[in-house]
Amino acid sequence: MSWGTELWDQFDNLEKHTQWGIDVLEKYIKFVKERTEIEISYAKQLRNLSKKYQPKKNSKEEEEYKYTSCKAFLATLNEMNDYAGQHEVVSENMTSQITAELTRFVQELKQERKSHFHDGRKAQQNIETFWKQLEASKRRFERDCKEADRAQQYFEKMDADINVTKADVEKARQQAQTRHQMAEDSKGEYSSILQKFNHEQREHYHTHIPNIFQKIQEMEERRIVRIGECMKTYAEVDRQVIPIIGKCLDGITKAAESIDQKNDSQLVIEAFKSGFEPPGDIDFEDFTQPMKRTVSESSLSNSRWDGKSEPKPGSKSKGKLWPFIKKNKLMSLLTSPHQPPPPPPASASPSAVPNGPQSPKQQKEPLSHRFNEFMTSKPKIHCFRSLKRGGGGPEDFSNLPPEQRRKKLQQKVDELNKDIQKEMDQRDALTKMKDVYIKNPQMGDAASVDHKLAELGQNMEKLRLEAQKFEGWLAEVEGRLPVRTEQTRRQSGMYDTQNTSAVSNCAQDRESPDGSYTEEQSQESEMKVPVTEFDDEFDDEEPLPTIGTCKALYTFEGQNEGTISVTEGEMLYVIEEDKGDGWTRIRRNEDEEGYVPTSYVEVYLDKNAKDS
């Protein structure tokens, strides 16, 4: 099967077919180019997607990635990044192994095709030239033969005419002979050219054209083979990355299998455990006896202090740090009264008299109403956001619940120990350098290192003092130390000196609102944030959330700075319960808030606020 023998007369069709083959090749190149562009675009989109959902540095999202589910999601994002890289590899390999190679091959193919068809046209023109020569000699031979016949007939006519002279007859005879000779010469030339043309024609159709068509056939077959190879390469490029993509998918599967719900639940406990004890049972208040009603009108702390309600034998008595306290709010520190509260009036409202008229303002809320408040009040979780800002909180993290405070202090101690270790490593390196300078003075001046060593020593001393301060607080939280020492308090810069009489007066109200007795003297009234830690940003902080309600038992005129006046029977919101100093912080509306003596009000804390 050869184009030279089978298609010897299809020169034009072969020219069109080969051009079509090159067009197909260029179309395939365009297809591969568009596929590489899609792969690059897809890889870019995958990378952007992975980057979009990566946790931002130094943000709250980084804390969330301690959970196994979030770690698995992060591993998925990383695997997707590698997955995108494999699509980039596919694009690069297709570009280098297919697109570039085929483009170069098409250029060579076009040049080769042009050369072959140029030779074919040249051979066609050569045979056409011989054909024209043959036709010309044939027409000349035919003309000479006709001229010779006419000359012979003219001679015979002249020879038969008796009236013609002998000279005319001789002339006609010579003319006829000349024409016959010319016809013989044309015949010989025609015969020669005919033989030559036949030879050239045989060469053209049996040698030249078959050779040219054979080369064109080989060229076309090479094109077909090359496009088939490129299609195989196209598949192999994809197949080469399948194992790596499979590993990426296996990594995602492995990350999903590593999710541990129990571990995540434990992390939630570690993250939000406050360390508080659940509130005790609510004591039954008997309203059937007028004398007991009078007793119940006093504050919760005084009634329990007087022995009217004994704590449960099984309940734990320990101090609490309530979670909904903003220690970093400027006004709460400046306006908090630092003096003992006044005692309740000797003669209370008319309801205090056993047989006197019952004051409508002193009506006690039924127990069912208080229970509904406990059950329906929502925890003010948004308060924790203000605690986590960290910009104006106390240095000892006393605004946090015990468990969270312990974690923060432990983290701070670990950071300080790392800093101390870095300073020690630098000191050791400088010490070695100084020894080298002493042994080899030409390498450097040993005295130039002394200043840096002294600076490192000062830094290490500061870091050690700082670490000791936080270790002391940590030991206090963990129960290793009963109270903070005076030296630690002075180092923290947070101790506000007060007279002992004020502290002794506050000792009687060291019960927390849920009835648990505070064994240790509360330090909250003694803590203050240095002025250098405050700035204008506190004006934008959220107001303290309400943790319950209270009812004024007596009228109180708030004349000191930080206090607020209340009237007997008035209902207000509690935003900060008694810290052991005998004062409770309340709010009337968004603009009016302050402190009142704890013994002047009866507090109803929200159950959810207690649980938090």
Image: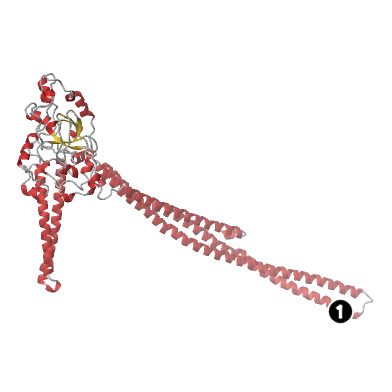
Q: Nearer the viewer, residue 127 or 173?
A: 127
The color scheme shown is secondary structure
Q: Is residue 541 left or right of residue 220?
A: left
Q: Nearer the viewer, residue 239 or 36?
A: 36
Q: Quadrant of residue 558?
A: top left
Q: Is residue 141 left or right of residue 421?
A: right
Q: Nearer the viewer, residue 40 or 363?
A: 363
Location of the N terminus (image quadrant): bottom right
User: Can you name the residue that lies furthest to the bottom here?
Assistant: 167
Task: Determine the residue positioned at 9% across, 43% down.
Answer: 476
For disc 1, the marked residue is 171
Q: Position of residue 23 (x, y in %)?
A: 53, 56
Q: Quadrant of residue 326?
A: top left
Q: Is residue 74 above or below residue 20?
A: above
Q: Nearer the viewer, residue 348 or 494?
A: 348
Q: Is residue 431 above or below residue 332?
A: below
Kindly tell me whether residue 528 is visible in this rendering. Answer: yes
Q: Secondary structure at mark 1?
A: helix
Task: Determine the residue positioned at 13% across, 50% down.
Answer: 413
Q: Quadrant of residue 306?
A: top left
Q: How many marks?
A: 1
| Label 1 crowd bin: few (<14), some (14–19), many (20+), radius 10 Å | few
Q: Is residue 318 above or below residue 531?
A: above
Kindly tell me whether residue 1 is visible in this rendering. Answer: no
Q: Position of residue 240 (x, y in %)?
A: 36, 53
Location of the C terminus (image quadrant): top left
Q: Position of residue 194 (x, y in %)?
A: 69, 69
Type of the residue with mark 1: Lys
